[in-house]
Amino acid sequence: MDVIDEKAHTGDVHEHYRIGKELGRGSYAVVKEATHRETREKFAVKIVDKKGQAQILQYLKSEIQIMRLLNNHPNIVSCKDIYESDTQLNIIMEFIGGGELFDKIVKKQFYSEKEGAEIIYTVLQGIKYCHDNQIAHRDLKPENLLCLSNSVSDLRDIKIADFGFAKLLKPGQKVQGNLGTTSYKAPELFLNEPHDFGVDMWALGVIT
């Protein structure tokens, strides 16, 4: 089986982390709690079965590279470690305990203009850092904005997550691809036309 990350640990992730309850599940990965056995620090681990997922693994290779490039920003979920075996990839990430912004919106139903501005300003700090580093996220949505606090009124420390569709662009480069989440997709994504960082600004406008 191909190696996805040359810098990954090849040992058993269970030797260093106690894997706990499921936090979320996608089409190709499951995310669970992970507690470091020595420090007792809590993390999240994205677990991917490598078998029969050649195309997905290429996205993951890019995702890991991008997360490492963006590891030092307070509004972006950081990648802490990688464990890889012949059959499985485990991405150890910062644990964000407050859940998705989407759930807060559903629970509270209404945010004032001031509160909305605070949310968007926070997200913009993370997006600016992405774009300054030539990275387009390409799947911005409330489900990919995670909150440190469980309180529906605490809007600080929102972090951008899930860089599975993100793309590292060369200066002036545009790429093609019909990807992202339907409700937040820019027209050029639907039309499979060349696009760049502008698709993130469209998605942020929809979120607003």
Image (cartoon, helix red, strand yellow):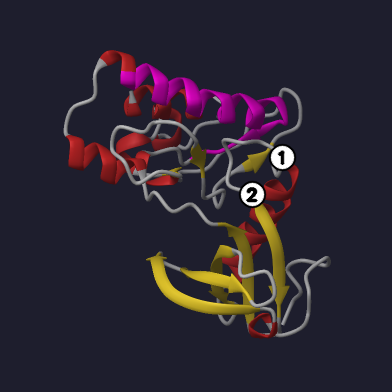
Q: Are marks 2 and 1 in contact (CB under 8 Å)?
A: yes
Depth order, front residue of 25/61: 25
Q: Which residue is mark 1?
A: 72
Q: Residue at x 83, y 65 (%)?
A: 7
The residue closer to the viewer here, 93 or 64, is 93
Q: Give x and y (percent) for residue 79.
A: 66, 55
Residue 196 visible in the current orientation: no
Above/below status of 121 relative to 134:
above
Image: 151 above or below 10: above
Q: Using the rendered view, name the quadrant where residue 82 is placed.
A: bottom right
Residue 142 % position (x, y): 36, 39
Please rate how many residues cluster around mark 2, counting C-alpha atoms within 10 Å: few if below 14, some from 14 to 19, many from 20.
many
- Image height check: is 112 above or below 11? above
Left/right of residue 170 with respect to residue 154 in the rendered view: right
Q: Would you say residue 121 is visible in this rendering? A: yes
Answer with left or right where residue 92 lies relative to residue 105. Answer: right
* Magenta stretch encompasses residue 130: yes
Q: Quadrant of the C terminus?
A: top left
Mark 1 surroundings: few (<14), some (14-19) or many (≥20) residues within 10 A: few
Q: Nearer the viewer, residue 207 or 177?
A: 207
Residue at 41% x, 34% y is 191
Q: Amino acid at mark 2?
A: Ser
Residue 170 x, y percent position in the rendering: 76, 32
Dot 1 amino acid type: Asn
Circle 2 is placed at which residue position? 78
As drawn, which residue projects farthest toward the front? Answer: 39
Residue 12 quadrant: bottom right
Q: Earlier in the sequence, mark 2 or mark 1?
A: 1
Magenta range is: 115-138
* SS state under label 1: loop
Separation of marks 2 and 1 at Cα, in angstroms:
7 Å
User: Does 96 lie within the magenta span?
Assistant: no
